[in-house]
Image (tube, rainbow, N blue to C red):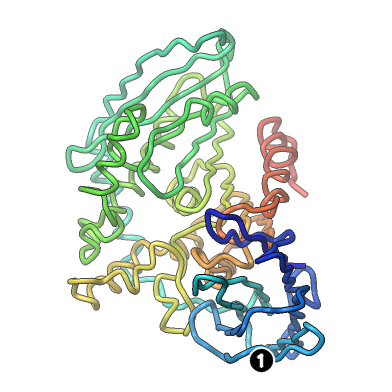
Amino acid sequence: MYILKKNWLGILLLLGSFYLLQAQITITPNKSDGVFSIGQTANWEVRIMQEQPPDSIHYSIKNGGLTVLSEGSLDFRKNTAQLRHQFKTPGAVLLEVRWKSAGNKWHSAIGGAIADPSNIPLSGKKPIDFDAFWAQKIKELSAIPKQPQLRRILLENEKSIEYYHTKMRSIDQSHIRGQLAKPANGEKLPALLVVQWAGVYPLQPSWAVDKAKEGWLVLNINAHDLPIDREQAFYKDKREGSLKNYPAIENEDKDKSYFLRMYLSCYRAAQYLTERPDWDGETLVVMGASQGGLQSLITAGLHPKISAALALVPAGFDTMGPTLGRKGGWPHWYTNTKNKDVSKVHRTSRYFDVANFIPAIKCPVLVGIGLLDTTCPPAGIYAGLNQLTSFKELLLLPKSEHQSKEGSQDAYHERVDTYWLPKLKNKTFPLK
């Protein structure tokens, strides 16, 4: 059941109850998991618990969150309306219900469904020179000495963990900055590379320290060449200045794209962990969410020693999704073309589409996919992961948008923390 709730800071699209002007509206699907077969019909019941409902409530059903398949005003009988969509091809649809409240403000609620996800097609082919391009970039990176620097930081009331700020060289005179944490008494440890979601912000020590307390050698890197512990004003200045809309930086040229440094930095960070004498030589896991999910999967595709990749609502898939009538994943290369040569941006995007790294992955993979995610829509993620030949566990989160609300992503986190990471750390395979 999709239920929505209003607070006075704005509408939060929650999947528990919501109240609008003392009204309760619920959107209830006929299948709780949201998964259908071709020929089946998704049905949503929209119910209003209010004597005087809003003047008008509109709906749209969109293929892949982009192309409108049907739309109109909802016809309520006894405060209940029905919406239906029959699937004729593999893919996902997004239901959006919109209405106006006092003050003439628009609000919305969403539902979703997906059919035959294992057969959703890719939106584009991998460039012929894709593998050669990335092999050459890794070769160029390897010619640059890492020159790693570690600065020990003493943690207050924490003597069981060694904690460091790290810095090493990358391409184009840039650096990879991050934090490293490890058990103080560990000699040979499983390694965990933690990569970050989108945005410009400092790194929190707990993001490395908490997993180090569980017995991991943890390296957590910044997605940008920035110090990791400056004041908030510093990052605000970067967000609004030189790094505003950073995905668009040089996005017409695969040799200059902002993501080139980011992707290669992930590769170098993984390589650095394999060269440390305290690595156990066997277990190297990479994990992250959103942009971090993107980085996790491309790292697994680029680095042969990654032993598992864990990704929640991964970005970067389906850069050419709109050519099939569906919305592509963040950073939405297809439409991020203001004042750019559109054809060059689209051509460049194919070298950074996560889907094109998937065939090279040989390790186990866990991915959490939000059925209601409009930032990283599910259809393109499934299309990319359908190429995966290694062990995979795909968790469709039927109540999840891009952000976790009302525990909508708890199933993924529980699977990571109580099963995957303990199994990987203790080398108790196979994963089932």
**Number of numbered tags placed on the structure image:** 1
Between 97 and 199, the one nearer to me in the picture:
97
Q: Amino acid at mark 1?
A: Lys
Q: Categorize mark 1 by other alpha carbons within 10 Å: few (<14), some (14-19), many (20+).
A: few
Residue 415, placed above or below residue 104: above
Residue at the image point whose x is 34% and y is 73% from the top: 334
Q: Is residue 4 left or right of residue 105?
A: right
Residue at the image point whose x is 25% and y is 41% from the top: 237
Residue 290, placed above or below residue 107: above
Between 162 and 153, the one nearer to me in the picture:
153
Whether residue 367 is visible to the viewer of this picture, yes or no, is yes
Whether residue 398 is visible to the viewer of this picture, yes or no, is no
Q: Position of residue 330 (x, y in %)?
A: 43, 63
Residue 223, placed above or below residue 185: below
Q: Position of residue 125 (x, y in %)?
A: 41, 76
Tell me the SS state at disc 1.
Answer: loop
Q: Position of residue 427 (x, y in %)?
A: 70, 34
Between 32 and 175, the one nearer to me in the picture:
32
Residue 92, placed above or below residue 372: below
Q: Is residue 403 left or right of residue 52?
A: left
Q: Which residue is mark 1?
A: 88
Q: Quadrant of residue 169?
A: top left
Q: Quadrant of residue 76?
A: bottom right
Q: Quadrant of residue 131?
A: bottom left
Residue at the image point whose x is 78% and y is 83% from the top: 80
Split into 4 quadrants, where in the image is the N terminus?
A: bottom right
Residue at the image point whose x is 47% and y is 17% from the top: 163
Q: Position of residue 315 (x, y in %)?
A: 47, 59
